[in-house]
Amino acid sequence: MQRNDRLSGYVWILLAAFFWSLIGVISKICMSAGVSPLETAFWRAAFGGALFLVHAALHKGLFIRPRDAGIFLLFGVWGVGVFFGATQYAIQLSGAAMAVVLLYTAPVWVAVFSRLLFRERISPRKIGAISVALTGTTLVCFSGGSLPGRTSLLGIGCGLLTGLCYASHYPFYRWWQNRYATATIYGFMLAGGVLALWFCVPVSLNHEPRVWFWLAVLGVTSTFFAYTCYGQGLKRISLVRAAVTCHLEPVLSTLWVWLFWQENFSLGGWFGSGLVLAAVLLLTTDKSRD
């Protein structure tokens, strides 16, 4: 792989991580205005999915095999409906910073999936980066969360569930990326997630303009922009590299909710976040080809 392609791959993944890091702080704005966690997840998927479907339509990407469309819709129930819903509950119960850091148990699953499905080699440096990232994640978990005085086992469980959901996106997208455009894949996936969430939560149209603005921003930035960048990145670097590089997201997310919502970790939690960032640096300085 060309050096410039790999560098641009990291840039795309880091942009995705930045947009995903906004999930916590924007979601807290929406939920503080009275929008439930599942409805917040619904509108995030709805706004982002609508943009992907429009983009796909403009590039004639909506006419695909019915069987493949069905697969994308079904995966969306898990990869969007369960994923987005669990994310919002983790944010509400354990804090946005805690939720996003727990999400990053994903590289362990990604390493397993990439090895079993795509025969990607897991180099010692990758194993080291994953170990460092998971050590940091563990420290964050045992720090008690980012909401002072509140430790929720359900919140931790939802956070860990998001890690498994998130990890499944990597092999799924890699499997289909050479057959369909990113907009087509995510347009149908998000449609499946929207349908699943529609049956799980009452959806209200009676929101103030300010709330609609933030719901739209959540869908546009953390869904449309993020997954577009993510798709471009996965075309250029391996699954495990992408998964571990995205560990910049919990560090940024922690910073945002600390600045705007006064969420804070203990010393151990901050040290764990530092280890997560170290894992990104360890991987991005790896010069091996895999």
Image (tube, helix red, strand yellow):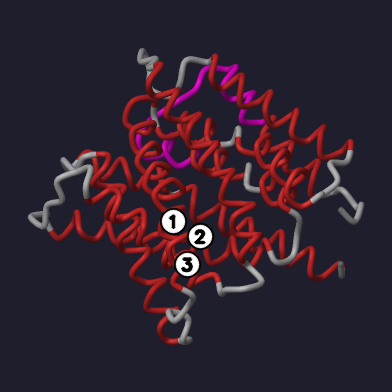
Position of 115 with respect to 63 (left or right) is right
Figure quadrant of residue 16: bottom right
Callout 2 touching callout 1 (CB < 8 Å) = yes
Q: Nearer the viewer, mark 3 or mark 2?
A: 3
For the residues labelled 3 and 1, the Cα–Cα distance comes to: 28 Å
Q: 146 above or below 257?
A: above
Callout 3 touching callout 1 (CB < 8 Å) = no
Q: Mark 1 falls on what kind of element?
A: helix
* Residue 279 in picture, x, y percent from top left: 74, 37
Checking the image for residue 265, the label placed there is none
Please name the residue that numbered disc 2 is placed on: 226
* Residue 222 in picture, x, y percent from top left: 44, 56
Please name the residue that numbered disc 3 is placed on: 67
Q: Mark 3 falls on what kind of element?
A: helix
Give the quarter of the figure containing the N terminus.
Answer: bottom right
Q: Using the image as rendered, state which of residue 97 and residue 186 is in the foreground.
A: 186
Magenta stretch: helix, strand or loop mostly? helix
* Residue 123 in picture, x, y percent from top left: 88, 41
N-term mark: 3 or 2: 3
- Residue visible at 58% across and 25% down? 270
Magenta span has 265?
yes
- Residue visible at 60% across and 59% down? 173
Callout 3 touching callout 2 (CB < 8 Å) = no
**Disc 1 marks which amino acid?**
Ser
Please name the residue that numbered disc 1 is placed on: 222
